[in-house]
Amino acid sequence: MTDRFTYLDAASAEPLHPAARDVLLSAAEQGYADPRRLHRPARNAGLLLENAREVAAEALGVRRDEVLFTSSGTAAVHAGLLGLGSGGIAYSAVEHQAVIDAVLWAARSPVLELTVDSDARVVPEAVRDAVRGGAVDVVAVQQANHEVGTLQPLQDVQAAVDGSGGDVRLFIDAGASMGRLPLPAAGDVIAGSARKWGGPGGVGVLVVRKRASWRNPFPGDPWARTDLGFTNIAGALAAAAALQAVVAERAEVNPRQHELISLVRERVRAEIPDVDVAGPAEERLPHLVTFSALYVDGEALVTALDRLGAGVASGSACTSDTREPSRVLAAMGALTHGNVRLSVTRDTTREDVERVLDALPGIVKDLRAEAGL
């Protein structure tokens, strides 16, 4: 395995899509000026930015004036969530850390954590209970979980929100799913991250529905629905190009990735004793899986695989310090110790996956032996 590195951490960042690579350099040469100015370079930059907005909107199936660009997926989450409502917030127990950070920073009351089932799926009854009293005016639920891939029942969540009898808004974090899955019809505001679909890092996308009662939560005109700050125009255009390509390819790519992850789930269960594969076998993101091996340190497993030429993730996938136990696995009642998240790219082959799977049982056995087990 050492002669070829197998990158299996696409859920953290997908390698740059060829469509983005082709656009990025040429756009950087033309899109350097401030698009708010009146001179020719500024007008050129403005045209590129509007082209990026148009392409992204078409790929997502929304209006062009509903698309805002931000400096990252995290920035999109923070602006999107904090710009909704002023009362209490309810969020699912398996949300990304960016959502948790925004909720804590907002310091609103009440703050309610919505329970999930053993597949990390939010319980619609918990949403109904949270919004029934009228103190909560924002609900945050992701489209798909970033660690175990579970698709959330967003239609049921939207129905619970709509049935509250009050003005409750729904925020959806689509960081793990935007481009890979159709944009949900539910939700007032939806956030995504370009690096998760093969766009460049440092670009986020925020979809603010025209019906949404949303305002800019940061300094500046609160009612201006414009990009926040000086937009990375070349990055936005490259992100839009990658998004367009990923949407066009997903009918072919998703089934192939789903099959590869099914192979991982089957072989890990069959070949490694005392292992817990988290999340559902179906109704999930096609490209990722998390499993936990009892009596094995996750970081040690990641390091051993890296030495053999394979890159995977471990720990909590939504914190900067990956040594922290996974909140997602804990919330769903799964084994948190020794967890590994494996996520395939658009170019990952069956041979790549089988090479890792062939080595994995021996690595786990050796690590357990080193621990005296």
Image (cartoon, helix red, strand yellow):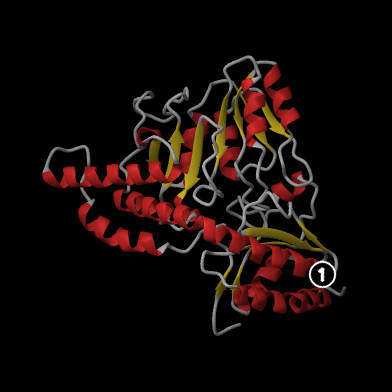
Amino acid at the residue labelled 1: Ala
Q: Residues within 10 Å of mark 1 (few under 14, many from 20)?
A: few
The quadrant in which the C terminus is found is: bottom right
Q: Quadrant of residue 96?
A: top right
> Residue, x 38% and y 24% (percent of image)?
222
User: Which is more toward the observer, 135 or 151?
Assistant: 151
364 horizontally vs 152: left or right? right
Q: Residue under label 1, please give it.
A: 270
Q: Residue furthest left?
A: 39
53 horizontally vs 288: left or right? left
Q: Residue furthest bottom?
A: 3
The quadrant in which the N terminus is found is: bottom right
> Residue, x 75% and y 28% (percent of image)?
125
User: Which is more toward the observer, 329 or 371?
Assistant: 329
Residue 70 in view of the camera = no
188 horizontally vs 129: left or right? left
User: Which is more toward the observer, 268 or 226?
Assistant: 268
